[in-house]
Image (cartoon, rainbow, N blue to C red):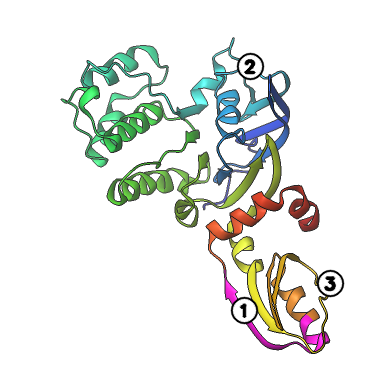
Amino acid sequence: MSERPRHAPPAIRLDGLTKRFPRFQLGPLDLTLEPGTVLALVGPNGAGKTTTLNCMAGLMVPDGGGAEVYGLHVDPARTEYRREVGYVGEESGFFLRWTTGRNLRALAELVPGWSDERARRLAERLDLPLDKLVGKLSRGNRTKLALVAALAHGPRLLLLDEPTAGLDPVVRAEVLDVLWEITEDGEHAVLYSTHVLSDVSRLADELAFLRDGRLVLRSGRDELDERWRRISFRLPGDVDPELPGVVEHRRVRAEHQVITRDAEATRQRLGSLGAEAVETSRMTVDEIAVQILKEGHHVARAAN
């Protein structure tokens, strides 16, 4: 990513953001996202990802704490922050019996800062048909329409709720290309929720893991890739050693298999113990995410 302008406020600042429901509570969340950064919000269904995005977009009123977008307070009663936010949510809100073009023309009358030229370029780039009824569009074309509508007013922050879920590989690649290009100037930022973790390696700089409404860990993508490993080994004697960084340890007779969040520390300890037949293998982002979300706050505390 490009270097961010000096003295620019954070693209996102969450300060104790809390939203309560009868059987669920989101937060309190503290989170900062700098311009030029893409952050993937990862978690199972019901973790609070959509609620987080809805609070940031001003679609829900938090019960505690607050949110800022480029230094502007997120308040549904005010409109200043909306100029900076483009949102693609689970519900599109488009008129199904209107064409895509008619929907976009209607939005042009309502959204401050809307650029017909920007909308046209994006529609051409994404090969979005403007003469088809929205109700007849494929899942991929509906996502393209939502993305055009979210970007046409030139927001600096994109909030995306599962933007590539259900898309075929070609459409997914087109969408990811557009999102990547948006952040290249160092001024724009993207926060998106996802369970399609193959997208993470293509787009995200960082990952924030959400479970049961709480942020359990935030880490750079490259850091996760470098530190997490699966290691197998043998040890003399009948021992189950304490190993630094290990979050899962299985043993089948003399064969030990561990998953570690600190591969270097684990290997050094195994060396001091005289471990034999040590074999190390990389883990996919999916595998790492499963371990982090399964271990929850235990992993988060150990990583700090």
Badge nearest the viewer, 2 or 3: 3
Specify which label sits upstream in the sequence, 1 or 3: 3
- Residue placed under numbered mark 3 in the picture: 242
Specify which label sits upstream in the sequence, 2 or 1: 2
The vertical placement of 34 against 70, above or below, is: below
Query: Where are the magenta residues, as a range?
Result: 270-282
Q: Secondary structure at mark 1?
A: strand
Disc assigned to residue 174:
none
Kind of residue at disc 1: Thr
Label 2 environment density (alpha carbons within 10 Å; few <14, some 14–19, many ≥20): some
Q: Outermost residue toward the top?
A: 77
- Residue placed under numbered mark 2 in the picture: 61
Q: Nearer the viewer, residue 107 or 50?
A: 50
**Hey, which quadrant is residue 252 in on the image?**
bottom right
Q: Secondary structure at mark 3?
A: loop
Kind of residue at disc 2: Val
Label 1 environment density (alpha carbons within 10 Å; few <14, some 14–19, many ≥20): some
The vertical placement of 50 against 222, above or below, is: above
Residue at 73 percent of width and 79 percent of height: 267
Q: Is residue 135 magenta?
A: no
Q: Outermost residue toward the front?
A: 253
